[in-house]
Amino acid sequence: MIIPVAASEDGIQEWALVELQGKIEPQRDVDLRESLAVGTMQLSKANQDVVQLQIGYHVLEGKRMLLKKPMAIMDKVQEIDFEGNSQTVCKVIGVLRHKYLFKTRPRALISRPQGRRE
């Protein structure tokens, strides 16, 4: 999963990669390609390289890593010049410099139903 992070001065967005071990399965008949909201990600206040991802009733703990080599996010565009000739060019729309790696198993969030006291 790739998410946009911020825009730079030259107009190219900086993106981040989210790497999960396993796969995400929706509970109902939901197409994950239509709905981009998968969960909530929070950076630690003490250490900006520690991150938590909450998906439903599960929490994943991971870390932010710098990629060895940045990657370009490109888009194919059909351009037509002033003579009417068309050509396909690739334009850079983003740069990928960091990834968030979640390699541990998810921890289940279990809470007591409200109204019951034991």
Image (cartoon, rainbow, N blue to C red):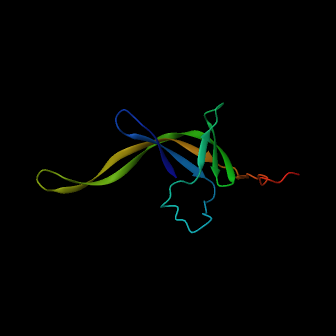
Q: Residue at x 73, y 51 (%)?
A: 109
Outermost top residue? 46
Q: Residue at x 61, y 36 (%)?
A: 49
Q: Position of residue 14 (x, y in %)?
A: 44, 40
Q: Residue furthest right?
A: 118
Q: Is residue 108 left or right of residue 82?
A: right
| 90 in relation to 27, above or below | above
> How many numbered marks are there?
0
Compared to 25, does 104 lie above or below? above
Residue 21 horizontal/vertical position (percent): 63, 55
**Which residue, as the protein is rendered here, is positioned at the far front?**
115
Residue occupying image coordinates x 11% and y 53%: 83
Report x, y in % for residue 33: 49, 61
Q: Is residue 22 left or right of residue 5?
A: right
In the depicted view, which residue is nearer to us: 111 or 55? 111
Judge from the rendering whether residue 40 lies leftward or rightward of residue 57; answer left or right.
left
Residue reaching furthest to the bottom:
29
Compared with residue 100, is residue 8 higher up or lower down, i.e. above or below?
above
Tell me if 68 is positioned left or right of 54 in this view. left
Image coordinates for residue 55, horizontal then vertical, percent: 63, 53
Q: Quadrant of residue 113?
A: bottom right
